[in-house]
Image (cartoon, helix red, strand yellow):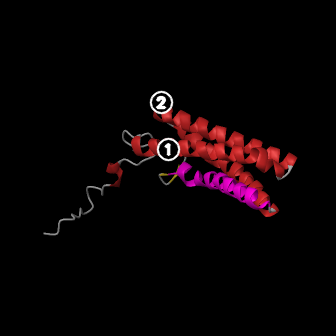
């Protein structure tokens, strides 16, 4: 049982999956912003290629993060009642939309699009990711979404109890 804590619906062995997969698109999108910055400084084609790949990987892994996050959001009514959960979801949808537009523009217009639009979309995405990450932290640390009830971790009544006090 999860007591009074909102539960994570998408889990394996009680371990929530959303925090497991969410770092992949985050790192990919931040990495793309870094490689865009490197491209602006050097105009070396490798940086533009790296950005495209990072955005592509970020978009694919964002689908996994969105699926697990949506399962948690829809799976427990208590999660949906938390305003930060809805704002977290909307912020992430905005980031994925910005990054998808960025990749589309880059693939159509070449690496020169990094300097005109790509860097701005990437910077906005990173700023929104900071906000969304803050909200995700609020969901876990303040609202205890997906956190196991401490009573679940207590040893069963039949098992020996050990004390830290060794008198």
Q: Is residue 46 visible?
A: yes
Whether the magenta-drawn stretch holds residue 22 is answered as: yes
Q: Earlier in the sequence, mark 2 or mark 1?
A: 2
Q: Residue furthest front?
A: 41
Q: Position of residue 35 (x, y in %)?
A: 71, 58
Residue 81 among those drawn in magenta: no
Contact (Cβ within 8 Å) of mark 2 with mark 1: no
Q: What secondary structure do most residues of the magenta stretch adopt?
A: helix
132 vs 165, left or right, is right
Q: Which region of the structure is painted magenta? A: 16-43
Mark carried by residue 81: 2
Identify the secondary structure beneath mark 1. Answer: helix
Location of residue 102 with respect to 57 vertically, above or below: above
Q: Nearer the viewer, residue 126 or 140?
A: 126
Relative image position of residue 88 (x, y in whole percent) = 55, 38
Q: Classify 10 Å Cα crowding around label 2: few (below 14), some (14-19), many (20 and above).
A: few
**What residue is at 78 percent from the left and 45 percent from the top?**
116
- Rendered location of residue 139, percent (x, y): 46, 41
Quadrant location of the N terminus in the rendered image: top left
For residue 136, side relative to residue 102 (left or right): left
Q: Quadrant of the C terminus?
A: bottom left
Q: Is 71 or 95 nearer to us in this picture? A: 95
Q: Left or right: where does residue 18 sit relative to residue 104?
A: left
Compared to 86, does 109 lie above or below?
below
Relative to residue 141, is residue 163 depicted above or below?
below
- As drawn, is 146 to the left or to the right of 89? left
Q: Which residue is most to the left?
A: 167
Q: Which residue is mark 1?
A: 134
Residue 125: % across, % down: 65, 44
In the image, what residue occupies the spot 84% across and 49% down? 107
Q: Is residue 77 visible?
A: no
**Res 86 quadrant in image:** top right
């Amino acid at each position: 049982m999860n007591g009074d804590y909102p539960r994570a619906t998408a889990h394996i062995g009680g371990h929530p999956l959303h925090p497991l997969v969410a770092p992949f698109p985050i790192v990919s999108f931040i990495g793309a912003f870094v490689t865009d910055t490197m491209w602006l400084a050097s105009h070396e084609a490798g940086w533009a290629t790296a950005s495209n790949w990072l955005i592509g990987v970020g978009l694919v892994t964002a689908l996994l993060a969105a699926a697990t996050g949506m399962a948690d959001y829809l799976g427990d009514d208590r999660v949906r009642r938390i305003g930060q959960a809805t704002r977290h979801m909307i912020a992430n949808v905005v980031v994925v939309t910005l990054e998808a537009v960025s990749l589309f523009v880059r693939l159509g217009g070449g690496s020169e699009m990094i300097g005109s639009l790509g860097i701005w979309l990437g910077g906005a995405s990173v700023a929104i990711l900071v906000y969304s990450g803050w909200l995700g932290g609020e969901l876990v640390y303040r609202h205890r979404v997906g956190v196991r009830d401490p009573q679940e971790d207590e040893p069963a009544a039949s098992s020996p109890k050990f004390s830290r006090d060794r008198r």
